[in-house]
Image (tube, rainbow, N blue to C red):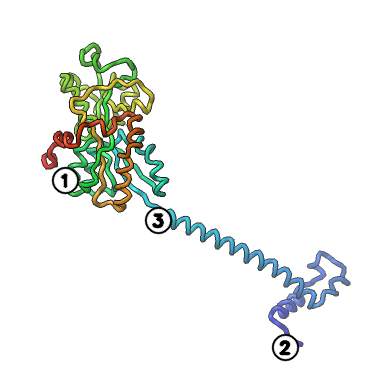
């Protein structure tokens, strides 16, 4: 019989030889323990090992399934398209709000990076990895297109910005009262005229009404129009020139100023030549120019692009691209 012992039988026999069953079986009567012959004990141990194998097999199978699911999710996340869009500060909140349906339709994400148009312009010139540029004017994207950073054929207006007087401590203050000098401020706030189109428009309005020389030294200049709104809203200044869209978003009184050249704040978008997703980026620009989105943009404090006469009239007021580079 010795030659027919399987490895399992050998293990059981060794187990019987080395372990005192009478002390291991919960102090069962000796007569019961002695009745556990090799065959019976072998059956018991196989049942125990079988259960262990079953649960081990299923546990590791489940673990493998979860691992596969995690890898699949990771692969999906890695394959998900992400568009990186540089956007002027005034339009950042509106862009995020309006682009949600587009993200769902094309199963992608849009990362909006906001700042002054001039600052974003410089980043793009130095190789910032953007797919699109939503500027607060036409000048900056046009200059980028002229220098090969933006595809000329993708340039399109998407909104017309508006400027307004805002005085947190004196909500009834109007532009006319400022022009008539019925109210003389100690400190005002505007965005940087060099880098922010809303700052440039603010300076133009102050200059037109012979107020720039009066306030230029006391003006607090923000990096962008969002910073200017925050400074004004905090009461740190007597009044500021901010975007109408900011006042609409905060449900504040709007006292709009009339610009001699509304085209100054005609906001253009374009697809970068180095975009990793040019087709989807072009669709996003088209999405914002669609009539349905234009109605929503108008409700957020902008004028729709059809409020302008003709695109040709716009181009007449655009400074030379080479003069500023």
Query: According to the image, label 2 marks what residue?
Result: 3
Of residues 33 and 48, the one nearer the viewer is 48
Check disc 1: other Cα within 10 Å, few if <14, some if 14-19, many if 20+: some
Q: Earlier in the sequence, mark 3 or mark 2?
A: 2
**Residue 25 image position (x, y, % from top left):** 80, 67
Query: According to the image, label 3 marks what residue?
Result: 79
Dividing the picture into quarters, in which one does residue 6 lie? bottom right
3 or 2: mark nearer the eye: 3
2 or 1: mark nearer the eye: 1
Q: Is 324 rendered above or below residue 172?
A: below
Q: Earlier in the sequence, mark 2 or mark 1?
A: 2
Residue contact between numbered discs 2 and 1, judged by CB atoms under 8 Å: no
Residue at image coords 45%, 56%: 74
Check disc 3: other Cα within 10 Å, few if <14, some if 14-19, many if 20+: few
Dividing the picture into quarters, in which one does residue 158 lie? top left
**Residue 140 image position (x, y, % from top left):** 20, 40
Q: CA distance from mark 1 to mark 3?
A: 33 Å
Query: According to the image, label 1 marks what residue?
Result: 146
State the quadrant of the N terminus. bottom right
**Residue 48 image position (x, y, % from top left):** 72, 68
Q: CA distance from mark 3 to mark 2?
A: 61 Å
Residue at image coords 21%, 35%: 195
Residue at image coords 19%, 37%: 311
Dividing the picture into quarters, in which one does residue 86 lie? top left
Residue at image coords 44%, 58%: 75
State the quadrant of the C terminus. top left
């Amino acid at each position: 019989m010795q030659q027919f012992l399987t490895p399992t039988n050998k293990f059981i026999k060794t187990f019987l030889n080395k372990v005192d069953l009478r002390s291991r079986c919960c102090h069962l009567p000796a007569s019961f323990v002695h009745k556990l012959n090799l065959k019976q004990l072998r059956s018991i141990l196989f049942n125990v090992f079988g259960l262990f194998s079953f649960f081990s097999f299923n546990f590791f199978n489940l673990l493998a399934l979860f691992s596969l699911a995690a890898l699949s999710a990771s692969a999906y996340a890695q394959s998900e398209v992400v568009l990186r869009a540089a956007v002027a500060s005034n339009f950042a909140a509106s862009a995020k709000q309006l682009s949600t349906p587009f993200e769902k339709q094309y199963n992608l994400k849009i990362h909006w990076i906001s700042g002054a148009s001039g600052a974003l312009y410089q980043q793009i010139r130095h190789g910032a990895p953007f797919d699109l540029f939503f500027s607060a004017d036409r000048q900056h994207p046009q200059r980028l297109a002229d220098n090969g950073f933006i595809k000329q054929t993708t340039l399109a207006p998407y909104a017309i910005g508006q400027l307004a007087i805002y005085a947190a401590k004196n909500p009834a203050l109007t532009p006319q009262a400022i022009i008539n000098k019925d109210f003389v401020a100690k400190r005002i706030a505007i965005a940087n005229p060099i880098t922010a189109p809303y700052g440039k428009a603010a300076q133009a309005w102050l200059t037109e009404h012979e107020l720039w020389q009066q306030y230029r030294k006391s003006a607090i200049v923000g990096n962008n129009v969002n910073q200017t709104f925050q400074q004004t809203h905090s009461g740190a200044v007597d009044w500021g020139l901010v975007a109408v869209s900011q006042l609409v978003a905060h449900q504040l009184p709007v006292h709009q100023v009339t610009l001699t050249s509304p085209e100054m704040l005609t906001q253009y978008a374009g697809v970068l030549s180095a975009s990793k997703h040019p087709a989807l980026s072009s669709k996003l620009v088209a999405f914002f120019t669609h009539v349905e989105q234009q109605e929503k943009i108008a409700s957020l404090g902008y004028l729709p692009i059809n409020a302008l006469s003709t695109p040709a009239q716009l181009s007449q007021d655009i400074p030379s691209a080479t003069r500023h580079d």
